[in-house]
Amino acid sequence: MIDLVTLGESMALFTARRTGLLRHSRDFGLSVGGAESNLAIGVSRLGRRAAWIGRVGDDEFGELLRSTLSGEGVDVRGMIVDPEAPTGLMVKSRRTVDLVDVRYYRSASAGSRLGPADLDVSLLRSARVLHVTGITLALSASAAEAVRAAVAEARDAGVTVSMDVNYRRALWSPDEASKALREIVPAVDVLFATEAEGRLIAEGEDAPGLAEALSALGPRHVLVKRGSRGAVELSDGVLRHAEPYRVTELDPVGAGDAFAAGWLAETLEGAPPERRLATACAAGAFAVTSDGDWESLPHRADLDLLTPADAVSR
């Protein structure tokens, strides 16, 4: 049985090994990336069964995505190979030591052609959780329809619906995002957002106030991610605060996906509220301590490494 199903676009990811202007880079690492597939890997590493639905090109990058996800234990039966469009590309570099720059080349990509007809309805309806993001809503008209159709199927089947806002300004304007998100949030059970993302949907003076305003729209669980300041969770009317872990950040990309994966994995385990929030924060913190969008996502045993008794493991 699949615990969690997610859908969206994953891309081939080129990462410059040199800090500075991208034009001067000659050496790149090749991997894959995408918020939804990152989360699926994170859930899988924490011991639950996850599946990813999406389109890839009939090319080597598409094969890289298939082999990477399946190698991480993610079910890829919902992956569709599109012979008429390429797998999208993402390029990540560091302009400075403290500034990561990510560029997307996804126009007319296979992933952007995702539509309602691509959904494995039986897979969706048999899962315990459906996870979607604002990225897929913004990707294309057909992708947005796929999200809405998936949410409708999940709700009809009694499947928990989880959503991470994941606002991407390169894909749509704040006004466009606000309108679309306000329409779908009432159908969501679990909502993840940063403070800035949450304010695209509702008003709140501070993180707790924002969580209350978002919860009033429908979600039973609202998690406001605050990065180095921790997180706030409002679940069934109970407000909880999580203090941040103090870690050395090497790569911030993927931290939000790790946070959501940690919270959802613990929820699927039936963990108490305090543990699911603690694991979410630990997973998010762990994800930034090494390079890679998903490579640094923790396994359960890794979470204890955030508070080691000794700096050397022997």
Image: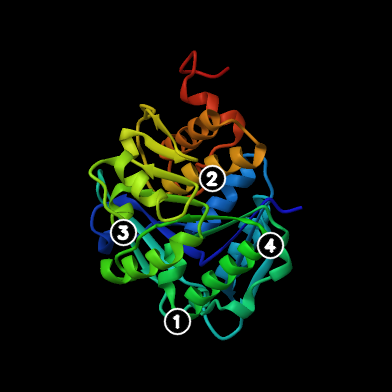
Q: Quadrant of the C terminus?
A: top right
Tell me the amino acid under the disc marked 4. Answer: Ala
Residue, disc 2: 261
Which of discs 2 and 4 lies nearer the camera? The answer is 4
Q: Nearer the viewer, mark 2 or mark 1?
A: 2
Label disc, if present, on residue 25 of the rendered structure: 3
Q: Say whether residue 307 is visible.
A: yes
Which quadrant of the figure has residue 105? bottom left
The residue under label 1 is: 108
Q: Which mark identifies residue 157?
A: 4
Is 128 in front, or is 34?
Answer: 128
Left-right relation of 80 to 207: right
**Lower position in the chain sequence, tag 3 or tag 4:** 3
x 41%, y 64%: residue: 90
Mark 1 closeness class: few <14, some 14–19, many ≥20 residues within 10 Å: some
At x 47% / y 72%, what residue is drawn? 88
Label 2–label 1 contact, CB within 8 A: no
Q: Whole-percent x and y of residue 131?
A: 55, 57
Q: Residue furthest bottom?
A: 84
Q: Amino acid at mark 3?
A: Ser
3D distance between C-alphas at marks 2 and 4: 22 Å
Report x, y in % for residue 183: 41, 68
* 311, 271: nearer the viewer: 271
Mark 2 or 3, closer to the camera: 2
Please identify the quarter of the rendering in which residue 135 is found: bottom left
From the image, state whether disc 1 or disc 3 is nearer to you: 1
Q: Earlier in the sequence, mark 2 or mark 1?
A: 1
